[in-house]
Structure formats: structure tokens, C-alpha cells
């Protein structure tokens, strides 16, 4: 891969801002929509830019090919489940906490990589990073001001959502030879198919009159934070590689905390700041170990 230029770092920062902005927008969306509806509208609106790009680039969508079961499974684990779990959790916890909790994805993926792959085993630096990162999460759960008996389960569900992303990423390796746009378009189609009956029977959103801010947020979550962000991720991956793109993980919890304060005036406690630093440092050590391995 070529040495990253200034424009590459700008694009990486934009991607981090978009993904970080998703959390306070999810919070706003919960003012009017249930978690299943939010998940459905995210994948519905998110499919438009991805499928349009596939049409323009003449990329064949294989959602109903012989590998349909992989697309359906990944669509459920990588989109339906985490989108639902995060939306459900954010109803009861601050969005900045969700941003920090979700940033544990690189740490969880490192643990799974150690367990299920032969060339991603722990070393000293990785172990230190994982311990520091997860200490930050455990410390965050000790913040009784923001996480208490009323929303403890909600916080755990957000963590479960981050684990779904990791498992979905592992499953994607089964179809890794296919074009990224094709894979994303196909799993979005299956996520929509899975969510249509769920949203119809469980929440029936057409019977409610949503607030304007909630409507804008859920459309933003779909088109920008899901569809456009995935396309931008592909661009960065193709030009600069996975290790460079993974640096977005350092920025998301930081930007998420800042944006939640700016737009929602969410409380930032000392424990939140310590947890934020610990998670960021943990991700840095894990990323450093992976980077040294690639040299």
C-alpha cells in the first residue's frame, strides 16, 4: 500500500465523524421509533446508495445466489441484530456511553482472532492492549451516575451488539473473494427481508406520527451512517488497506463523546473520561501489535 496522504487522513476523519454521529442520532430516533423500526429504516435507506453504486458500476448482486444462506446469516448477525440491540440499549443509556462500548469491537475481534485463527494469536503488546481496554469498560460500568440497576442490561445489550459486528466480520471471511459492494448490497437486501415481518408485527410504525427530528435522524442513519459510510470505508480499504482503516476505531469514541455533548448536552463524568482514555489506549496497543506484525 502507498504511504497515506493528507486526503487519506481527511477521509478517515470524515468516516470516524459519520460513525460517531450515529450514536446521538440513534438517541434522537428513539424519541419516536422503536428499536426494530430503527433497524429496518437504517438498512432500508442504507441500501439505496450501495445498490445504486452497484448499478452504476455494473456489479452483480448475488443475494439470491447459491451463497444466499451466507448473505442471510451475515445480514442478520452483522446488521439486524446489532442495529436492534444498539437502538434498544440507547433508549436507556447516554449515546456517549454507547460510542465507548461499541469501540470495543477491535478488542473483541482480537480475542476471537486468537481463538479461531492460526495467525492472529496473542502477544505481549496485544495482551496489554486488551487488558487496558476491557479495564476501561469494566470501570465504565462502575459509574453509578450513568449506569445503574435501571439500565445495566441495556448497556450489556450494546456490548452484545458490538460482539455481533465481530462475529459477522468473521463470517464474512467465508465470502471474502466477492466484491465488497456486492456483499454489502446482498446483506442489506437480506436484512430488509428479515426485518419487514418483524417490524410489521412488533411495532407497526405507520400507526404513529414521528417527530421531525427523529425522522431526519433515522434517514441520516440509513443513507449517511450506513450506506455512504460503508462506501467510504471501501474506498479507504482499497487504497490504504485494513490497518490504516482500522485507525478509525481510535477516533469514534472520542468524537462520539464530543458530539453527544454538543447536540444532546449529555453528562460527561470523570469515569467516562478515564474509560474513554483506557479504551483508546487499549485499541492503540492492539493496533500497534498488528501494525508491527505487517512490517
Image: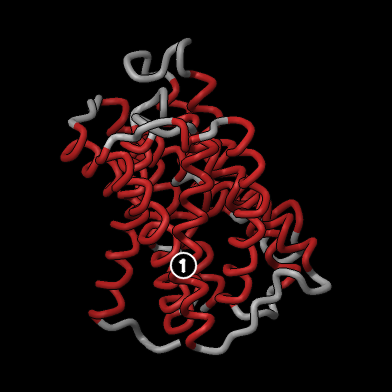
Above-or-below relation of 77 to 238: above
Above-or-below relation of 288 to 235: above
Tell me if 211 is positioned left or right of 246 in this view: left
Question: Residue 256 occupies which quadrant of the picture?
Answer: top left
Q: Residue furthest front?
A: 207
Question: Residue 15 occupies which quadrant of the picture?
Answer: bottom left
Residue 211 seen in this snapshot:
yes
Tell me if 164 is positioned left or right of 21 in this view: right
* Residue at the spot 66% in from the left edge and 54% down from the top edge: 193
Q: Position of residue 74 (x, y in %)?
A: 68, 57
Q: Position of residue 159 (x, y in %)?
A: 54, 36
SS class, disc 1: helix
* Residue at the spot 31% in from the left edge and 39% down from the top edge: 214
List the residue tagged with mark 1.
48
* Residue at the spot 42% in from the left edge and 79% down from the top edge: 235
Q: Residue furthest right?
A: 66
Amino acid at each position: 500500500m502507498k504511504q497515506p496522504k493528507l486526503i487519506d487522513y481527511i477521509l478517515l476523519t470524515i468516516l470516524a465523524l459519520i460513525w460517531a454521529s450515529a450514536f446521538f442520532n440513534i438517541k434522537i430516533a428513539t424519541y419516536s421509533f422503536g428499536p426494530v423500526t430503527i433497524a429496518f429504516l437504517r438498512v432500508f435507506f442504507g441500501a439505496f446508495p450501495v445498490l445504486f453504486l452497484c448499478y452504476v458500476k455494473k456489479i452483480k448482486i448475488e443475494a439470491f445466489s447459491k451463497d444466499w444462506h451466507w448473505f442471510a446469516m451475515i445480514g442478520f448477525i452483522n446488521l439486524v441484530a446489532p442495529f436492534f440491540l444498539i437502538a434498544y440499549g440507547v433508549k436507556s443509556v447516554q449515546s456517549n456511553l454507547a460510542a465507548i462500548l461499541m469501540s470495543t469491537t477491535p478488542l473483541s475481534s482480537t480475542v476471537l482472532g486468537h481463538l479461531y485463527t492460526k495467525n492472529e494469536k496473542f502477544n505481549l503488546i496485544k495482551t496489554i492492549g486488551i487488558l487496558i481496554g476491557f479495564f476501561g469498560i469494566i470501570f465504565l460500568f462502575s459509574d453509578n451516575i450513568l449506569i445503574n440497576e435501571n439500565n445495566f442490561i441495556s448497556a450489556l445489550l450494546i456490548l452484545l451488539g458490538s460482539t455481533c459486528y465481530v462475529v459477522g466480520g468473521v463470517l464474512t471471511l467465508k465470502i471474502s473473494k466477492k466484491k465488497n459492494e456486492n456483499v454489502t448490497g446482498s446483506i442489506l437486501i437480506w436484512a430488509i427481508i428479515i426485518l419487514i415481518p418483524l417490524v410489521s408485527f412488533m411495532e407497526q410504525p405507520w400507526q404513529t406520527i414521528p417527530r421531525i427530528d427523529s425522522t431526519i435522524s433515522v434517514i441520516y442513519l440509513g443513507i449517511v451512517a450506513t450506506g455512504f459510510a460503508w462506501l467510504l470505508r471501501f474506498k479507504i480499504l482499497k487504497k490504504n488497506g485494513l490497518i490504516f482503516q482500522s485507525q478509525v476505531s481510535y477516533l469514534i469514541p472520542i468524537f462520539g463523546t464530543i458530539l453527544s455533548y454538543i447536540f444532546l448536552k449529555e453528562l460527561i463524568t470523570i469515569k467516562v473520561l478515564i474509560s474513554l482514555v483506557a479504551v483508546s489506549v487499549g485499541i492503540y496497543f492492539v493496533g500497534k501489535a498488528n501494525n508491527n506484525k505487517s512490517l
